[in-house]
Image: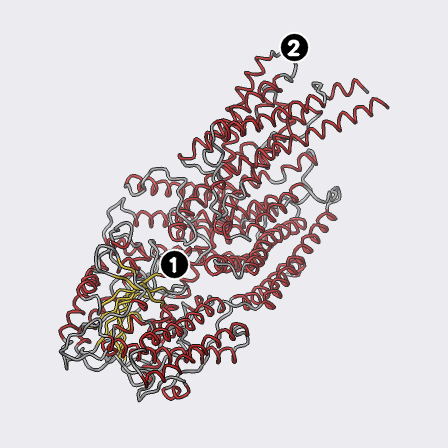
Amino acid sequence: MWGWWRLGKWTVLVMFLHIIAVLIFTKGFLLTRTELPHSSHCSDLSQSPCHSSSYCWTKPVVDRLIIIVLDALRFDFVAPSSFFEQKQPWMDRLKVLHRMTLVNPSSAKIFKAIADPPTTSLQRLKGLTTGALPTFIDVGNSFGAPAIVEDNFIKQLIQNGKRVVVMGDDTWTQLFPNNFNKSYPYPSFNVKDLNTVDNGCIEHLLPSLHQQDWDVLIAHFLGMDHAGHIYGVDSTPMIEKLEQYNAVLEKVIEEIQNQSGPGKLHENSLLLVMGDHGQTLNGDHGGGSPEEVETSIFAMSFKNLPTLPSEFVSSSCEPSKNICISSIHQLDFAVTVSSLLGVPFPFGSIGRVNPELYALAVGTWKLDDNKTWNNQDELKLEEWLQNYVNVICINSWQVKRYVDVYSASSVIGFSSEDLFHISDLYAKAKENQLNLSFDKNESSNTSLPVLKRQIVAYFEFLSYVAELARSKWTEFDLKLMVTGIGIMLFSIYCHILAIRKLNKSYVVSLPLSRDSGISFGLMLASFTVLMRASSLLSNSYILKEGKVANFLLATTCIVTLRFSFMMNKLLLEAIIFLLLIFICRIAIEIGLYKQAATSQFMSASSSWVLGISLSESMWIYIVEIVSILALIILGYFLYNAISSYCRGIAKCAMMGTILSYLLIALYWISESNILDLPHFLKGMGKTYIPRTIYSIGLGQILLMTFVPLFSKEEASSYKGSLYVKMISILSTCSSTIIILQGKQGAFVALGFLLAGYCMMKLQGIEQHSVGGAAKITILDPLPILQWSLLAVCLFFATGHWCAFDGLRYGAAFIGFDEFVLVPQAILLTIDTFGFSHIFSVFGLPLFVQMEHNSLLSINLFWIFMVYGLITATTATATIVCVAIQRRHLMVWGLFAPKFVFDVVGLILTDLLIFVASIYYF
Amino acid sequence: MKEDLEKSTPSKISSFQVFLIHVCCGLALAVGFWVAHNVYSINLISHPTSTLRLIWAIEFPVVILLFSCFRQKPEKCSYLKAIARGLLGLPVGALLNALGALALGAPAGLQYFERTVSWSLLMSSLTFVPTACVYGSCWTDWHRIFACTKPKGSLDFMLCLPAHGAVIGAWFGAWPMPLDWERPWQDWPICVSYGAMAGYVAGMVGSLGLALMHTGGGKQLKAE
């Protein structure tokens, strides 16, 4: 142990420095908006300058509100296909909504609702109910689903005696525990289950419509989100879901219409059908691309209503038909709904009451029951505007109050300049309001334009605040960020110091060697690392990071090839290596293509399209057979390794791996349609084979950890025993990684193996020229750099990318049907970082050159440190670049996810290096 | 001393000749651009394939005719044979350049095929063909110039430096490609070609400078 500490203390030191630096930087960078504990009360209104009435805040204009949330409702699910260039199979499926808007354009309306990223369900529900902006760090809480502490409209409803019924997605009950009069929650996390939540919703929705014991009903359908995650948008399950919803909505509307007569249950009801966020064609969501943030709200009341003057209508109409679509920010939802129901607006809301949605409520118009109204009826309109001005006045006052309280209580509020501008705008609007009250008493004829002007003044104020908040609530604490960067740089300095120390002790222990100072390999390696580091400054290079890494890897490889030409040896290895890089490059481009389909920043340019449609069954068969073949080759190599080198415990462990490989092959066969297995067998295979493989892996790790403690094995050479250790741990990891990665896993493992072999052979090749036939004496960072670049390339080649929609959530459900947080988080981590971090760190002893024991451990640590340094340099570059680009347009879409991935990768690498150094020592 | 020098420089070439050749090669590139612009009114950005082909069509004969004059062992190898060597070297060099570019990430789709071919032909004329004309298939000379980078004398410099310059220039020229500026010149292989030609010219300047120094050094040696 002491021996380990002598060398290993550096890894520990560096790891701690990294963790501290990352924590400090993250605290400064991913700031949360301070959540204020205040909430609005009925009595607060007396402080406002607005016309107060006998109501709580605003006059309740809707008696009952039915909110049907369809999770991941894309805008084009709802909008008629004539709004789009091309009609896609998933469009025009919710026909009932179109029919209603066509029949009754003034009382039913489709809105394009624009959400604020991150577009995860939990974040959106928070945003919808609080009317506030989320911040980036909240995404991480998405799994934990904490209750909302901020003031929100559900809380207001409860406080003001409204009865709320909720059904469907159980996120609602997690967000608002014990708030609902009745709830019918269903588990939401099992992505593969398309129907439980929806069937539960349908079961309770229609009967509830007849009941009198609620004022607000929320039904959250989840099937569409799940169908998107599993099958994508263009799939039959998705279309079936849409048709199912169409039928349900038809029934609901019919039911409400039947009850909408005078004196009946739904005389004054409003129906809202809305999405919480959109989804990409792959069914992913979370980011800020138009497809993800654009969702829809369909609002319908059940009476004929007048239309608003065109100044307040933001709709775009299609030319042929009569359907117009307005747009609304999701931010405005909470406050609009609150004003409709007459409850105080949530304290932290910065939205505005949307006039079009507000006008859809029957109660806002003073309608005589039997009289048909006239569109040109100025008086009616004026009354409406009068009321609306009052509502928007309260709205503005509430927003102003929030801004004031926020900047008073938060350490980092708005800048005084912005605050001044806000106050200025508000004062102007208020001044108008005072004039208005005079006007109202004297003459009512002139007030229509005055009212309009007034509303515009308030709009100006509200939109300015919303814009400002959007830009400011991604605020950064520069001091913390700079401190974090400073510690990071210090850690790099320590790293370099440690490496130099190791170098020195290495040189001292070798009697014949000379320290030649800067070798060509070192120069090339530093140059490459610097190129890669500086490339992270640009969003374009981050987007195409895989290609950049591949470019650099290919460059170093070409240099190696040149050296091998120079020495006239190992040509074959160099050429195979280059070939592997070429294959890797194609895989990266396929990955990029996948990414482009979902990414907001990339256009799907298909430079590599080969004209083969992979859906053809023959290709599927070929892929299946070849992947199993690759697995067999892997197993064969392993078997060879076992029979020639290993005995005892290692042999035992590796037999387990071969068994795992057999099971994986079995799993793939059972998954595919090559053999028609009975259904129950398939089901068994789906859950039990992966679990068996996981447990075999775990057992192997335990075996390898504990058995060496009791029995010392005699090895022929230190290097030999090191290799045996390496092969056994790699093979142990490989089975789990391969099954998680799917069919590509076997190829990638094989490629990794081959590339590792080539690199090991090729290492130090340029020093052959320097040292002649003498033994290699100088430690060469070039192969380690290549290894680390290869790891980066494989991260991208296996279909990952640095974004949250790049995580392959499907992998977490291999072997599990239910959502259990801990094992699935572990599986997702293994899938994401399997090849690029776990495999590559444990494979590092490949580059050990020394046979002698003491030198060998120095050499090993040197390799670990260099690898760590390369990772740390890249991560530091990412951190610095993120700090520089913090005002960049894509900071949340691109830089922040990249930062999170890099930082997690860095800490993981440190941890793995720590573990590996103990294991190998 | 004099004999030594003669031995080490395989075929004598004066710095004026070096200057002449480089000027001719550089001029050929310039003429290529000029013809493309003024005669056919195309440029690299609007018509990359045809422009590259045009430049190549002007550059390649100049290169092959000039460098064949400096073939090794002129007594054994006729001028025509040297030209034939250059012609043979052209596809080989083009293939190697194309493969290198593909490994580094050049687009591999069929719609880029013509561009890649034109680009690699031009690259081959800049890098490969001169050496093929001068040294033919002599492995040791190739090895010395391209693998070990140990050129001896002005002729070697003249072959080695511009070729390396072109490759390194092309490598740097590839860097703007992924940027999202959405300029037409970011398309493959436009900026790479610009980079390659800039590197080539820089290499020629370097080679000229070295040739001058070399002869200067030689004279000094003689004076001693």
The residue at the far right in this view is B224
Between circles 1 and 2, the one closer to the viewer is 2
Q: Residues within 10 Å of mark 1 (few under 14, many from 20)?
A: many
Res A635 quadrant in image = top left
| Figure quadrant of residue A308 | bottom left
The local secondary structure at tag 2 comes to loop
Give x and y (percent) for residue A269: 21, 76
Residue A107 drawn at (x, y percent): 21, 70
Locate the C terminus of chain B by quadrant.
top right
What amino acid is labelled 2 in the image? Glu
Using the image, determine if residue A73 lies above or below residue A411. above
Q: Is residue A489 above or below residue B213?
A: below
B9 to the left or right of A919? right
Q: Secondary structure at mark 1?
A: helix
**Picture layout, residue A255 above or below residue B171:** below
Q: Residue at x 60, y 25 (%)?
A: B25
Which one is in front, A625 or A732?
A625
